Image (spheres, helix red, strand yellow):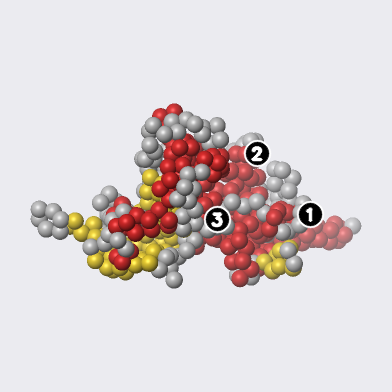
Amino acid sequence: MPLIDLQDVRRAYPSQGGDVAALDGISLTVEKGEWLAIMGPSGSGKTTLVNLIGCLDRPTSGALLIDGTDLATLSRRELTRFRADKIGFVFQQFHLIPYLTAVENVMLAQHFHSMSDENEARDALIRVGLEHRLHHLPAQLSGGEQQRVSIARALINDPAIILADEPTGNLDEANEGRVMDLLRHAHEAGKTIVMVTHDPTIARLADRCIQLHHGRISEISIFSNLEDEEYDEILEQLWIMRENDVPLTQEHINVHGPIPLDRALPGMLRLGLLTQKGSRFVFTGVGERRASDIVRRHRLAELLFSETLQLRDEAELEAQACKFEHILSPEATTRICTFLGHPAACPHGSPIPRGECCLAANGEREKSSLLSAQDLGARS
C-alpha cells in the first residue's frame, strides 16, 4: 500500500467567471521512504497539492488516502489530529513564532502533538547544529539557522511525511547545502519527503520528480542516473580501498549520495557489480572493469588539468576530476590518454589502470624495438 495515494483528485476554487481548477484530475502515489520533488511554473498547482497532502485543505472531488486512511472520512478535529501525528512541515518563510526562542518554537510543536519536553527539543536542535542558538529569538538567527529550527520542529514528533515547500528558497548557497544535507539524512533515516522546488539541481536529489502544468502532471522523471553515479562513486572508493589494503566492508565506505548505502549496495549486488563473502564485498568481472574505467577517467582527468592548466591545488584537482569522470566518453578518454603519452600514474603517484590504447601503444613500441634489433643484427 502506498503511503500517499491520490485518485483523480480535483481542487477547484470559485471565481466570478465560474470555478477555477487548481488541480484537475491528479492521480499519484508516493511510496513509504520515497523522496518526491514537485516542480512547475507559478500557478501550476504545486502549493495546492502540498496543502492537500498536508491535510490543510480537502479535494473538491476524488480520493486522497494517507497511510490507508481516506481523509474524506475524517472530521475537522480528526483531520487536525491526523496532521499532527503524520506530517512535519518545512516552509520557505520558516513561520517561527517571533517572540519564542528556538527551543520554545520546537516545544510548541510538541505541545500541539502531545506533551512538551525541553530536553528532547534541545536534542533536536543540537542534531541540526544549533547547540549555541537554543535560546535565541528568530530575529537573532540567520535565515539558514531559522530554517534549521523549522526542520528540528518538523522532525520533533517523528512524522511519517515531511512536506517541504521551497525549503531553500530564501537561503544562500552555503545554508542551502546544510539544509539539503539535513533533508537527505532524514530521507536516509526512512522519512518520506514531498518537496516543492524551482531548482532542478535540488530536484535531482529526489527519487522522482513530477512536473505540474495547469493543475495536471505533465512529466514524471525517475532519477535512475543518480543511482548509477552513486554506484560509480562506491566502486571507485572500493578500488582505492583495495589499493590501500582496507577491508571492503560497508563500515569503511564513506559515500554520502542521495541513496542510502543500505539501498545502494543491495542494488549493486543485484546488478552483478559486486558479490559478498561474509561482510566483505568482492568485485565481479563486470564490476572490476567498471571500477577500472572510473578510476582511469578520474586519474587521467587529474593529470590533464595538472599538466595542461597547471593546476596544483589538490582540492581543485579533485573537484574538477570528479566533474569529468562521469561525462568522459570512452573515445574522449582514449584521446586524453594518447595525448598524455599513456601515463602510468596520476599527479599523486597513484597508478592509472591500463586501457586498450595503452596496450596497443605498448605493443607498437615492442614491435618497433624488435624491428630495430633485427635491423641492427642484419647490419652487423
Report the Cα–Cα distance between label 2 and label 1: 23 Å
Residue shown at 51% from the left, 34% from the top:
134
User: Three-letter amino acid code at disc 1?
Assistant: Asp
Whether residue 173 is situated above or below residue 300 in the rendered picture: above
Element at label 1:
loop
Residue shown at 86% from the left, 61% from the top:
378
Q: Residues within 10 Å of mark 2 (few under 14, many from 20)?
A: few
In this view of the protein, which residue sits in the foreground, 333 or 21? 21
Between tags 2 and 1, which lies in front? 1
User: Three-letter amino acid code at disc 2?
Assistant: Glu
* Residue annotated with mark 3: 189
Q: Residue furthest top?
A: 140
Report the Cα–Cα distance between label 2 and label 3: 33 Å
Element at label 3:
loop
Residue shown at 38% from the left, 37% from the top:
97
Q: How many marks?
A: 3
